[in-house]
Structure formats: C-alpha cells, structure tokens
Image (spheres, helix red, strand yellow):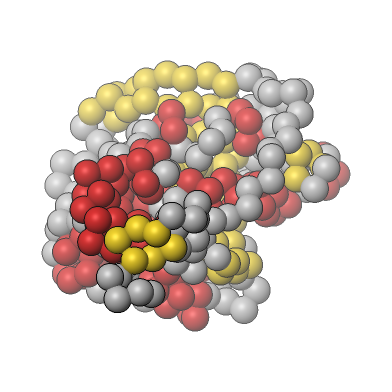
Amino acid sequence: MDPAGAVESETGPRVNRRRALAWMAGTAATVVGAGALGTELVSRGVLPGQQVLRQLEGACAVSVPKAVFSGLGPAFSGRFASQARRRTVGYTIAYPPGHGPGSNLPLVVALHGFGANHGDVLSGMSLAQALALRVDGAPLRPMALVAADGGGGYWHAHRGDDPMAMVVEELIPRCRERGLGLAPQPIGIMGVSMGGYGALLMAEKHPELFVAVAAISPAVWTSYGEARGANAGAYSSASDFAANDVVSHAQALHRTPVRVASGLSDPFHPGVVALVKVLAPGAVIDLSPGCHSGPFFRSQEPASFSFLSRHLAPSTVF
C-alpha cells in the first residue's frame, strides 16, 4: 500500500481507501452483489466498509461454474392466511422434473434471507431450477421444494409474529396434504444468510421433524451486543438471543446430517467458525474464499441441494 492509502482493485486501477468507503455508502446494495439477500449487510450496517474493500482486493472473487439443468418441473404459488404470523403469507411449491401434483416426495423447506420473500429465496435461480440441477453431470434425486414469506425476524417468534410456527404448524401441513413430506417421506431444510441461520435454528428446535439441514453463509452472531448493533430487530432481548443462539444449542444437531458453507471474508464468518467447532464430527463443512455475496451463494447452492437429495431421497427411487 502506498502512502496515500490506495488499494489495487480487481480491474487494475488504484482506488483511494477513503473514496472507496464514501462510494460504498452511496452504492452499497450494488457492491454487495447479492440482490435482496445482500440488504442484510448494507441496510443494517454490518461492516459495509470492510465488504467493499474485500471486493476491491479480490477476496470476494469466487469461481461459479455455469449451472446445468434438466427440463424443469412445475411450480405453483399461492397465499394463505397465517395465524402464526397474523397476516397473509405468500408461498411457492416446486416439483422436480417428471413429477407434479399427486407425486409423493420428500420435501425441502427453503428459508429466504433478510429483505427477501418466497419468490427470491435462492441466488440466481428459481426453486424449480434448483430441483432440476445437474451436479457433476447427474440429476438430483427427486424431492419437492417449498418456500414461504417469513419476514425479517430471523425465523423465530417475535411479538405478534412467529415465522417458525408458520413453517412447522401451517406450511408443512399444507404440503403434507399434497403428499409432500408425508411419512415415510422425510423433510429437510435449507437457507441462505438469515435463512441459513433459520434453517439451523429450526433443525435444532425440531430435530424430530427435519432429517437434514444445509446452511449457506448463515447469519450467525457471536453475542447479543453484536447482533443488536447490526440489527436491533433480530432479537428482542439478551434472553431471546440466548434462547435462539444456534451455537450454544448445536448439541441438538448431533444426530442430524448438517452441511454448512461460509466465505472466509464473510462478516458472519467468526460466528460460523464458533458453530463449526461445536458441530458433530460428521458435519460437512466448507470454509473457502468468498464474501457474503451472490457469487459465493451461487457457488454453494448445487452442493447444498446435492447433499439434501442424498439424505432425503433413497437411491432406490433415483
């Protein structure tokens, strides 16, 4: 670094650090590059300056192979009155290629990130596309995928709004009425960012319901003070944080197949590292270069769905 404090950008020109930070304040949502999921960092002030500097220094550069899909299965969206959330909730159910209404299938619940909804749970693909992925040349084993609007409350109960109860007591029963996740067919859960945290939390709270969990860049804080400083609405109190801290309750996952991925330059990475230290030895962990951004999310989605399909769908139906 020269005396003026310039840093080398990915494209070559040298950028003054102060100018980079000022530019970040005005265009943060674009720089984060994660769509609605990225608002978790920029709208709540989670280290925006560090994120842009990591972008400029190339720490966020992730190789994302082109996704390959089979022919898409159908997807259906609707709305229902949620008593748990005290509002109307939108949802989407997607089927794998060659299946549709009437199929009895394992089910994966997909939880969206902060600022998103059931229509943009994943980064760069739809729910139907996710089920049609070909990973290493092979299709996923058949399973259905459902997503619903969970708000911005980190997938646990707040006064007048309980998105976890909505998922467990309303959304999953609606799916089971359609033959999805109906015993003996299992149910898994996954999510990105806030949704990744929510997936871990729900799997801890309901180990009898969710048989596998995949979390991409989960939004895990290491303390209530850290969480409150970044997003005052995430937890109502220190006791609320303690009750919903996925690190201190990770013992509940010791019999559940778990996959967790986090970028080394993700501001939530310290929390993920704390989580990884207390997960069972058999957990699948991918801590690799990347940021809390779209390229890292997209790079991890195929492997996450492949992981879930192996644990949810027996090879005899493949």
**Considering only vertical position in the picture, is 283 above or below 130?**
below
Where is residue 307 drawn, in percent x and y? 67, 54
Nearest the eye: 203 or 126: 126
Residue 112 at least partly seen: no
Which quadrant of the figure has residue 78? Answer: top left
Relative to 317, is 49 above or below?
below
Q: Farthest residue to the front: give it.
A: 3
Q: Quadrant of the N terminus?
A: bottom left
Q: Is residue 207 left or right of residue 229?
A: right
| Total marks in image | 0
Q: Is 308 drawn above or below residue 222 in the view shown?
A: above
Relative to 180, say whether 136 is above or below.
below
Direction from residue 162 to residue 304 in the image, left or right: right
Taking the spot 38% from the left edge, 65% from the top edge, the residue there is 7
- Identity of the residue drawn at 22% across and 69% down: 226
Q: Position of residue 130 (x, y in %)?
A: 62, 36
From where the camera sits, is residue 52 visible? yes
* Residue at horizontal 21 percent and vertical 49 percent from the top: 25
- Residue 280 versus residue 196: which sits nearer the camera? 196
* Side of 260 where 238 appears, left or right: left
Left or right: residue 130 compared with residue 112:
right
User: Is 146 in front, or is 268?
Assistant: 268
Q: Position of residue 217 (x, y in %)?
A: 46, 58
Residue 15 lies, in percent from the top left, at 35, 58
Quadrant containing the C terminus is top right
Residue that appears at 61% across and 28% down: 128
